[in-house]
Image (cartoon, rainbow, N blue to C red):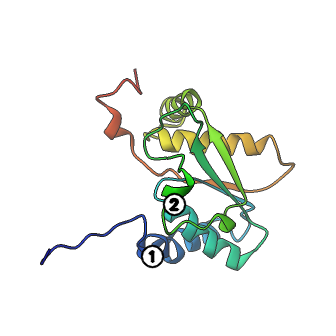
Amino acid sequence: KEGLFILNQFSNPDNYEAHIKTTGPEIWKDTNGGITHFVSAMGTTGTIMGASIYLKSKNPSVQIVGCQPTEESAIPGIRRWPKEYLPKIYDPTRVDKVIDIDQADAVRRTRELAQQEGIFVGMSTGGAFHAALQLVNEIEEGVIVFIACDRGDRYLSSNLFG
C-alpha cells in the first residue's frame, strides 16, 4: 500500500546492525576487551546477532549465550522459535550455547533485581540474569555480560511484582 512502510524487525538487517554499531562496541569498551561471555534473551534475535558479530570480530573466543523459554514457559520478550519460524536475521552459527529458562526462575530473578539491586525490568531480563548466574557456576573465571532488555513498568498491571 502506498505510504506504508513495515520495519519487520525479524528480517530487517538494521535490527542487528544497530547492535554491531552500538551495543557490541559499548560492551567491548566498558569491559576493556575482557568480556568472555555474552548472554542475551532471544526475541527478534537482533541484539544477540549484532553483539555476536561485533564481539567475535574482536575476540573469536567470546562465548555467545542465548536464552529461550522452556517448552512449558511463557516469558514475554523471549521466544522458543520453531525452526520454520526463526527470524530471518538469526544465524545459529553465531550462538555458542542456548540455555532454556523456566518461567518461575525468570520471575524470581526479575523480582530479585528489583528488590535487591533496584533494577526495574521485565521477565526477559530476569531470564537472561538467571542464565548469567548459571554460567557463573560453570566457569572458573571470566567476565559475563548480560543484557537488561526490557523495563518493569510494562508489568505493573500484572502479578509479576505481586
Task: Give the image quarter of residue 69.
Answer: top right
Left or right: where 43 falls relative to 32: left
51 to 138, vertically: above or below? below
Q: Which residue is mark 2?
A: 45
The answer to whether 4 is drawn above or below residue 63 in the figure is below
Q: Residue at x 37, y 23 (%)?
A: 159
Residue displayed at 55% across by 70% down: 50
Residue 100: x and y, percent?
A: 64, 41
> Camera-side residue: 96 or 141?
96
Q: Which mark, residue 94? A: none
Q: Which residue is mark 1?
A: 13
The quadrant of the image that shows the C terminus is top left
Q: Earlier in the sequence, mark 2 or mark 1?
A: 1
Looking at the picture, how far across and down is residue 22, in whole percent? 49, 73
Q: Amino acid at mark 2?
A: Thr
Kindly give the residue lying farthest to the front in the view shown.
84
Please tell me how many numbered marks the rendered image carries: 2
Residue 98 position in % (x across, y down): 67, 50
In what element is the residue under mark 1? helix
Q: For the residues marked 2 and 1, what is the alpha-carbon distance in whole angstroms?
A: 11 Å
| Left/right of residue 140 with respect to residue 95 in the rendered view | right
**What residue type is disc 1 on?**
Pro
Mark 1 and mark 2 in contact (Cβ < 8 Å)? no
Q: What kind of element bears circle 2?
A: loop
Q: Is residue 86 left or right of residue 28?
A: left
Above or below 97: residue 124: above
Label 1: how many residues lie within 10 Å, few (<14), some (14-19) or many (20+)? some
Furthest residue toward top: 162
